[in-house]
Image: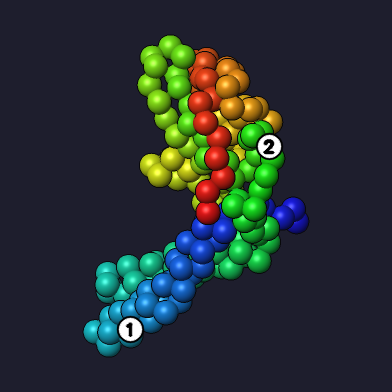
């Protein structure tokens, strides 16, 4: 299996989620199942079935996180020095050439991508269009709502 890139901050966040699931969520669900089981007939016990379903979800997420972290290649973005070129881990300030609006994104691993936090997956169309470009470059890429043109205003590598 190919090693998936992950920023150090993203790996830390995933380890935190894994620890929380194992140390608090898993015991809470086990207790909820035991309590629901104590209510008697399991066939018509909605609390029991809901708790079992949640247990399956949590166990699946634990397995997913453990596998992802075991295959991850953690990249310390603060040690990168690509001489202004955009590579994995870059935080990029862009200006939309049509509207003049500014946006900032960090290129991260697929597992840590979260558009609400301006974290875009390295395999996303925008990230693929950015990689290899330099500060000051303009580029176009195919967005879901049509072709977008951006200018790269700044490139930095944060911890």
Which numbered circle lies on residue 83? 2
Q: CA distance from mark 1 to mark 2?
A: 54 Å
Q: Nearer the viewer, residue 52 or 133?
A: 133
Which numbered circle lies on residue 31? 1
153 vs 123, left or right, is: left
Q: Quadrant of residue 32?
A: bottom left
Q: Residue at x 60, y 20 (%)?
A: 137
Q: Residue at x 46, y 14 (%)?
A: 97
Q: Residue 78 location in percent, x, y? A: 59, 52
Q: Nearer the viewer, residue 58 or 114?
A: 114
Q: Quadrant of residue 136?
A: top right
Q: Nearer the viewer, residue 81 or 58?
A: 81
How many C-alpha atoms fall within 10 Å of the one at disc 1: few (<14), some, or many (≥20)? few
Name the outermost residue toward the bottom.
Answer: 38
How many C-alpha atoms fall within 10 Å of the one at disc 2: few (<14), some, or many (≥20)? few
- Quarter holding the N terminus is bottom right
Q: Residue at x 53, y 54 (%)?
A: 159
Q: Is residue 104 above or below residue 46?
A: above
Q: Is residue 151 above or below residue 7?
A: above
| Local secondary structure at mark 2 | loop
Q: Is residue 33 visible?
A: no
37 vs 67, left or right, is: left
């Amino acid at each position: 299996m190919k090693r998936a890139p992950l920023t150090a901050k993203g790996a830390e966040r995933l380890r935190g989620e894994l620890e929380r699931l194992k140390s608090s969520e898993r015991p809470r669900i086990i207790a909820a199942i035991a309590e629901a089981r104590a209510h008697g007939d399991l066939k018509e016990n909605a609390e029991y079935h809901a708790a079992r379903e949640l247990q399956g979800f949590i166990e699946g997420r634990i397995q997913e996180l453990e596998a992802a972290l075991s295959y991850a290649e953690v990249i310390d973005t603060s040690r990168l020095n690509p001489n202004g070129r955009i590579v994995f881990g870059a935080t990029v300030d862009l200006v939309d050439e049509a509207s003049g609006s500014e946006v900032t994104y960090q290129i991260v691993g697929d597992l840590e991508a979260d558009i609400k936090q301006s974290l875009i997956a390295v395999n996303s169309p925008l990230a693929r269009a950015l990689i290899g470009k330099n500060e000051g470059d303009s580029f176009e890429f195919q967005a879901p709502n049509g072709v977008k043109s951006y200018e790269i205003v700044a490139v930095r590598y944060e911890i």
